[in-house]
Image: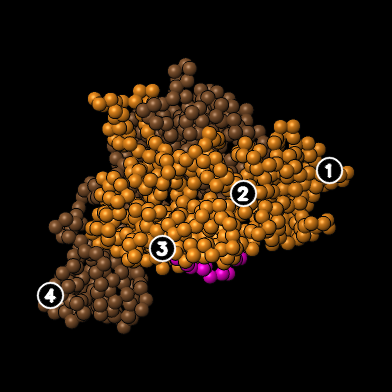
Chain colours: A brown, B orange
Amino acid sequence: MQTKRIRDILRHGQPDETIIIQGWVRTTRQLKEFTFMEVNDGSSMGNLQVVIDVNIPNYNNVIKTLNTGSSVEVSGILVTSLGKGQRIELKASSVQVYGDANPETYPLQKKRHSFEFLRTIGHLRSRTNTMGAVMRVRNACATAIHNFFQERDFLWVHTPIITASDCEGAGELFTVTNFDLNKIPRNKQQEIDFDKDFFGKRAYLTVSGQLEAEVMAMAFQNVYTFGPTFRAENSNTSRHLAEFWMVEPEMAFCDLQGDQDLAEEFLKYIFKYVLETCPEDMEFFNERIDKSVLETANNIINNEFERITYTEAVKLLEKADKQFEYAVEWGIDLQSEHERYLAEELFKKPLIVTNYPAAIKAFYMRLNEDQKTVAAMDVLAPKIGEIIGGSQREERLDVLERRIAQMGIISDDLWWYLDLRRYGTVPHAGFGLGFERLVQFMTGMGNIRDVIPFPRTPLSAEF
Amino acid sequence: MQTKRIRDILRHGQPDETIIIQGWVRTTRQLKEFTFMEVNDGSSMGNLQVVIDVNIPNYNNVIKTLNTGSSVEVSGILVTSLGKGQRIELKASSVQVYGDANPETYPLQKKRHSFEFLRTIGHLRSRTNTMGAVMRVRNACATAIHNFFQERDFLWVHTPIITASDCEGAGELFTVTNFDLNKIPRNKQQEIDFDKDFFGKRAYLTVSGQLEAEVMAMAFQNVYTFGPTFRAENSNTSRHLAEFWMVEPEMAFCDLQGDQDLAEEFLKYIFKYVLETCPEDMEFFNERIDKSVLETANNIINNEFERITYTEAVKLLEKADKQFEYAVEWGIDLQSEHERYLAEELFKKPLIVTNYPAAIKAFYMRLNEDQKTVAAMDVLAPKIGEIIGGSQREERLDVLERRIAQMGIISDDLWWYLDLRRYGTVPHAGFGLGFERLVQFMTGMGNIRDVIPFPRTPLSAEF
């Protein structure tokens, strides 16, 4: 007899098939001649209804241990369900309980739990409907990302997690050390002697793999990273994690135009893939979490993204019949309220804003001919704001060196990055996508801590 | 005109196609009426020969900047090659040089470089034949891993990198901190006050995602991790990295038998995938790096793995007509020499050794009925030794608690892990594969630092 996943049974199962299922009990209802039991195996939202006749072997003992949360293996035959709510059900011929779950202490009884509470039981919360759906959609997003890039001949490159360079300067860095913190060695000048630390120098957790991805793009043309990155910012918000996953493609022989094209194609691909592979989960989010989830997804898939320059965006914002908290003028960094106005109210679809003022963007972004703006882009989406940030990179050695000097960056650690411009430099471009932001966007989940299995935030590194 | 990757041109290109290529110059040879140039674009081992006629626009200026390492875009028409060594070549109609490379300073001139030297130019080494092939095979291995698990309905789960738990105890841990190391706060007892650190407690870099993967398997049945893990061991060997990637599947409702089946299927799948997708690179490794690479791969693919118990293995080693450095008796941990004897000399194919003595294995491995051995397995392969280690996990709460106590592990941090046995526990199993070991195995590369883009080792965290 074949062990089947419940998702496949609910989608395709036919009466008279004999099968085995394995999973966890969600609910039971004991009648005189039967017990009804709903079983979930994590393959989808759906539970399979199992009908347990009093005449199956060992009925009384089995029933005693069938609580919410118990793990079971059921053999039986599929039959057309006469009850409401399901097409098909499993008539059990035998039920084995592997482990029960004491109803007095098992926290996931049949009632709604707040996401706050569920975070305190991070080791159990994936067994709930919502978190189960989140993790399946998260996996589908991740798979879509790999498929997208592999189909297009990009290499997945593993850029380092531990880095000795802090010149990206994207917020605060975690220190990685092998020192005994009770006796940190000091040199003659009484400074901390990092020569004696594991790597012989001060080391941090990476904030981005971009610079190393550029190295790899200069050998393989098209590459992408997909790995964890870190921020030691003390931000206790629903949008920040200390540890999160990032996707960073980097393309040689590519300009800002190509960068925008790829970003648009990329987002459309992921949304399409998830709608196709997780329809039950997406329906659930649309019904229970955020009624606009499916509309947003279809909006992404079916619309050409608007493309405007920063300068045009500022003009549109200045003309807007709307009072912003932060006043708009050329030179400011666009705030979330501005981005949302453009995407949600004005264009009502995703847009890409390009060519931002050089002064507010990173040193590696390519200086435009006007000498004031850089070839940067942000992809803004309704409801979420910025979802992707990218740029064409500065490939001209002299211009890059000048910008590094202007911005007061100590370039000693960047000798290798400059070498890329010294030897066989090419126009190149790339972007970054915060993976958890994407999953939030896809699912409508309000708090970023609820779209990653084990969130790391200030004062919290449980499990 | 279409931009094409050189790998595809070499495989399928036909005379009279007009195309564009983009890449980096490997060599040039200037004759009176032509210049020959070999271009590589990172898509494969192979270079495309380009013939540049003196009559193309701007010939003299172009030629001046065509050095080894220069980046170029060439338009032209494919023609049958009359020269030796290639089927087809590109007759250039125009050549654009994006960036040149000064032959006086560019380190990658046409001569062989030692791998030691190449490590000092980690930002350029991927442009060499060997490192290019390694990174392509590495990407193919990674893709095969995702494909294998996704096809089998496993979820990719991202287990945390920063962890507050040190109970896995697999060697030394890196500390992650946000403290200013010059003024580490202390409490009244003058102990370091980790309450004041970012996570409110002492934090480390993970050594394994297994325990968290077990959490996820208890919700989704089949999951896998694929992410970075860390060891702060001061091992300056050709087999150790401080930062490396691990793959860890975990299956609910699975025993040691199923674990072995999956491990065997998994390795066969990866080797097959790489032979199919990177034939040129694998040929190269077989010719230039290790003449047994293809034989090893075929040995893995075509043989059923031998399966023996530890107790049988010890008997075979005791009977062996061979002097081992480490004496063999029941209870010892098998040494590399023993593993290699079994795989290379005795069975001449991969084998899986199961049921090791409890005393030498981790606390979470399932105790067998004999009360002396645990349901562990190691997959041993010719030439490489242990490539996979796994086990069925102890799912019985009382037995697990007893083992934790016996081994002197402080279980305060493990409350959630024990909860998995308290609520709906099931037999489950999994294994771990060191990703870089796999790539070494696949390519025959002698030093593990040469199969990861940016190796982290004692005193080295460059780039």
Q: Which residues are magenta?
A: B297-309
Asked if badges 1 and 4 are on one and the same chain, I answer no
Q: Is residue A284 visible?
A: no
Give the residue drawn at x 19%, y 57%. A106
- Badge 2: residue crowd in 10 Å (few <14, some 14–19, many ≥20): some
Q: CA distance from mark 4 to mark 2?
A: 67 Å
Give, as a three-letter code, the residue at label 1. Gln
Looking at the image, which is closer to me, A193 or A454?
A: A193
Mark 3 belongs to chain = B
Looking at the image, which is closer to me, B113 or B171?
A: B171
User: Which x, y percent locates residue B345?
Assistant: 60, 63
Q: Nearer the viewer, mark 2 or mark 1?
A: 2
Q: Secondary structure at mark 4?
A: loop
Q: CA distance from mark 1 to mark 4?
A: 91 Å
What is the residue that sits farthest to the top in this orientation? A189
Give, as a three-letter code, the residue at label 4. Leu
Asked if badges 4 and 3 are on one and the same chain, I answer no
Q: Secondary structure at mark 3?
A: strand
Which badge, 3 or 1, comes first in the chain's sequence?
A: 1
Name the residue carrying label 3.
Answer: B355
